[in-house]
Image (cartoon, rainbow, N blue to C red):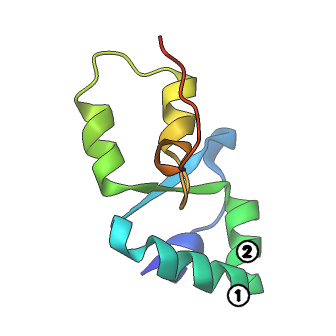
Amino acid sequence: AVHEALSLGGRPGGAQRYLVIPGGRAALVGEKLERNPLWQRAMEEGGWRFIKYRHVRQLAGQPEIDEYVLRTVVGLDPVAEREGAQLRLF
């Protein structure tokens, strides 16, 4: 399914695209991305980013979301999950 999503053509209006995945699959997706140059190219050309389901639920519960908050939860290894990473206070 990831391959099919990454294969969707174009980047509509330069928008950032997000693919929501279960957190338990992040390591598998990361490994496949590392080994598959076709997926790597599709990610770059399509402007794809990954975000985990639970982070989408957290974002949905927040009254306001700014770019910083979004950046902390995007990715296979988001800043919000990195040990020793410092999040802003306000």
Residue drawn where x is 49% and y is 72% of the image: 5
> Could you say which is closer to the camera, residue 74 or residue 27?
27
Residue for badge 1: 36
Residue drawn where x is 55% and y is 58% of the image: 77
> Could you say which is closer to the camera, residue 17 or residue 75?
75
Q: Is residue 53 visible?
A: yes
In the image, residue 75 sits, relative to residue 13, either above or below, namely below
The Cα–Cα distance between marks 1 and 2, rounded to whole angstroms, is 7 Å
Residue for badge 2: 40
Q: Residue furthest bottom?
A: 35
Q: Residues within 10 Å of mark 2 (few under 14, many from 20)?
A: some
Q: Is residue 66 left or right of residue 41?
A: left
Residue drawn where x is 58% and y is 32% of the image: 86
Q: Is residue 4 visible?
A: no
Name the kind of residue labelled 1 in the image: Asn
In the image, residue 65 sits, relative to residue 7, either above or below, namely above
Position in image of residue 83 (x %, y %): 53, 49
Position in image of residue 85 (x %, y %): 59, 40
In the rendered image, the quadrant that contains the N terminus is bottom left
Name the kind of residue labelled 2 in the image: Gln
Total residue callouts:
2
Q: Residue furthest front?
A: 84
Position in image of residue 22 (x %, y %): 33, 67
Q: Residue furthest top?
A: 90
Mark 1: secondary structure = loop
In the image, residue 14 sits, relative to residue 25, either above or below, namely above
Mark 2: secondary structure = helix
**Quadrant in the rendering for residue 46:** bottom right
Q: Which mark is residue 25?
A: none
Label 1 with label 2: CB-CB less than 8 Å: yes
Q: Residues within 10 Å of mark 1 (few under 14, many from 20)?
A: few
